[in-house]
Amino acid sequence: MADIEGLVEARDVTPSATQGAGGFYIKGSDHLDWGMKNRLARIIKPDTGRTVMLAVDHGYFQGPTSGLEIMERTLEPLIPYADCLMLTRGILRTSVPPGCQAPIVLRVSGGNSVLSELSNETWNVSSQDCIRLNVSGMALSIYVGAEHEHQTLVAFSDLIDAGHDAGIPILAVTAVGRDMVRDARYLSLASRMAAEMGANIVKTYYCENFERVTSTCPVPIVMAGGKKLPEIEALTMAYNAVTQGAVGVDMGRNIFQSDCPIGMINAVRAVVHYNEKPESAIKIYEDEKKKTSAA
């Protein structure tokens, strides 16, 4: 039993206007339980309210794509600069050191390959395995307007329930049917649908009138990096996305397929976290490239 000698009764019991933890800084998340908020705060950094996620989950349907042939070689130098890693459970178990401090958003959908209809996938990793792997988020693709739209949306609904049961936030990866252009009309549709179904974060593509996508989505938007672009174009796209309402990027090929991945991820960080203009951020990439070439 605790020693109660010298116990002094509480004296200042006046209610405070700032009592408690206060409002949560992540859009649409103030109502969530502490565990969900804590995991979201690992992904979206409290000091800036932004995130640079490193997407290396491409192999789940593409196999050993360029830049991801030997995963540990790609990941080892980049992990220290990534706010979060998005990958599959196989790569997490085989290629990420257990001492890694970067939070994990785990890809939990699959069931198709690049050789087949891409929308034909579903939820394929249990929430219990995600708990075992200590992940901070679970990511599933929804295909709005595609052949298997209903299948992916039902799987997403089931995942939302499982995520709340486990206290793990859900990231919706939005895609639209092949016949639909990636414009604000369809991307705002897919993003809003994901949020209405319960997503905590939505990953979608950049497009013209991107403010329509971010402003009509009640949870944070992260921009998908998409195909490999020249470095200055990728930095410009990231800059435009965050200045138009995104909380960050989930970038893969534009980092790991760059001829200087460390320089590129640091340039992206400068844009996302510190609002560095692309013309200035590109110098970070170029300086690192020169240093690497001289070594």
Image: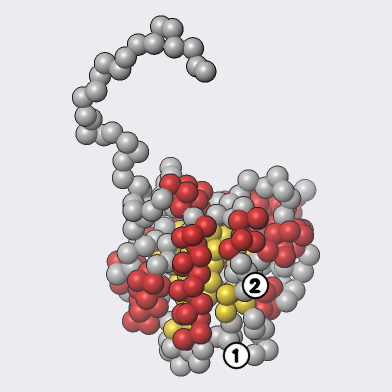
Q: Can residue 13 be seen from the camera position used here?
A: yes
Seen from the viewer's position, the closer of residues 122 and 61 is 122
Q: Position of residue 111 (x, y in %)?
A: 64, 81
Circle number at residue 163? none
Question: On screen, 178 above or below 169?
Answer: below
Question: Element at badge 1?
Answer: loop
**Marks 1 and 2, Cα distance to the nearest angstrom?**
16 Å
Q: How is the image coloured?
A: secondary structure
- The number of numbered badges drawn on the structure is 2
In this view, the residue in front, 195 or 292, is: 195
Disc 1, disc 2: CB below 8 Å? Answer: no
On the image, the x and y values in percent for residue 101 come to 63, 46
Badge nearest the viewer, 1 or 2: 1
- Badge 2 crowding class, 10 Å Cα cut-off, few under 14, some 14 to 19, many 20 or more, is some
The amino acid pointed to by label 1 is Glu
In percent of the image, x 47 and y 49: which residue is there? Answer: 35
Residue 292 against residue 259 in the figure, above or below: above
Give the class, few, some or many, for how many residues have Cα within 10 Å of label 1's Cα (few <14, many ≥20).
few
Can you tell which quarter of the image residue 7 is in?
top left
Query: Residue 293 placed where, x, y %?
Result: 74, 54
Q: Amino acid at mark 2?
A: His
- Tell me if I can see residue 252 in this picture: no
Q: For the point 44% across and 84% down, which residue is it?
A: 144
**Residue, x 46% and y 67% (percent of image)?**
160
Question: Which residue carries the number 1 mark?
Answer: 117
> Which residue appears farthest toward the top when viewing the image?
6
Residue 184 in percent (x, y) is at 35, 78
Residue 58 numbered tag: 2
Q: Secondary structure at mark 2?
A: loop
